[in-house]
Image (cartoon, rainbow, N blue to C red):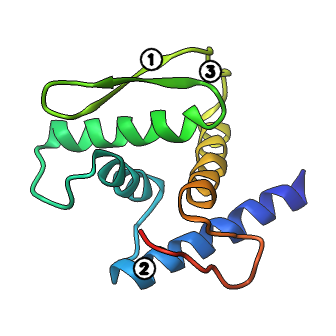
């Protein structure tokens, strides 16, 4: 398990470095990456969002990345174009550290599936973000 944790952290830092290169600003933490995913999934680009909208963007991101593991399913878009998700499989009960690992694993999977980024490789070769 120890090597798996090291690999996860190595891949996570590769993702952060690549996002910094593309965005010219490094996300501070998991929440920053989730915010970026939420923006991508909303598809409206960067703008000034209220605190509540920022929380909603992070919720969109969490549902999207956990949908890759079958926990959530997209229900559709509301009248304002915001995606809504429904829980289809109960989430495991984890402590905070395990929750963070689960999210990081699925965030990495998101970038691999959505953008064809490969984190096992020393160089990440994104097509677009």
The one of 42 and 54 positioned closer to us in this rendering: 42
Which numbered disc, 1 or 2, marks the residue closer to the eye?
Answer: 1
Mark 2 lies on residue: 20
Cα separation between marks 1 and 2: 32 Å
Depicted 74 relative to depicted 52: above or below: above
Residue 12 in percent (x, y) is at 62, 65
The secondary structure type at the circle numbered 2 is: helix
| Disc 3: which residue | 91
Discs 1, 2 touching: Cβ within 8 Å: no
Relative vertical location of residue 34 with respect to residue 80 in this rendering, above or below:
below
Residue 87 pos. (x, y %):
50, 17
Q: Where is residue 81, by image quadrant? A: top left
Q: What crowding class fits label 2: few (fewer than 14 Cα within 10 Å), some (14-19), or many (20 or more)?
A: some
Q: Residues within 10 Å of mark 3 (few under 14, many from 20)?
A: few
Q: Position of residue 80 (x, y in %)?
A: 13, 32
Residue 14 appears at what percent x and percent y? 62, 75
Quadrant of res 69: top right
At mark 1, the secondary structure is: strand
Seen in the picture, residue 31 relative to 57 is either above or below; the reply is below
Residue carrying label 1: 86
Contact (Cβ within 8 Å) of mark 1 with mark 3: no
- Between 52 and 94, the one lying in front of the other is 52
Q: Residue at x 17, y 36 (%)?
A: 52
* Measured Cα–Cα span from mark 1 to mark 3: 12 Å
Q: Give the distance between the C-alpha atoms of the residues marked 3 and 2, in whole angstroms.
A: 31 Å
Nearer-the-camera pick, 86 or 20? 86
- Residue drawn at x 42%, y 51% as measured from the top left: 34
User: N-terminal of the two: label 1 or label 2?
Assistant: 2
């Amino acid at each position: 398990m120890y090597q798996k944790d090291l690999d996860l952290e190595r891949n996570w830092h590769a993702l952060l470095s690549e996002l910094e290169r593309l965005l010219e600003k490094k996300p501070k933490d998991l929440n920053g990456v989730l915010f970026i995913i939420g923006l991508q999934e909303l598809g409206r680009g960067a703008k000034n969002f209220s605190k509540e909208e920022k929380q909603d963007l992070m919720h969109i991101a969490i549902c999207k990345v956990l949908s890759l593991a079958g926990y959530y399913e997209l229900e559709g878009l509301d009248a304002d174009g915001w995606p809504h998700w429904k829980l289809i499989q109960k989430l495991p009960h984890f402590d905070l550290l395990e929750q963070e690992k689960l999210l990081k694993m699925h965030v990495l999977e998101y970038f691999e599936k959505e953008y064809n980024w490969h984190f096992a490789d020393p160089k990440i070769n994104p097509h677009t973000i």
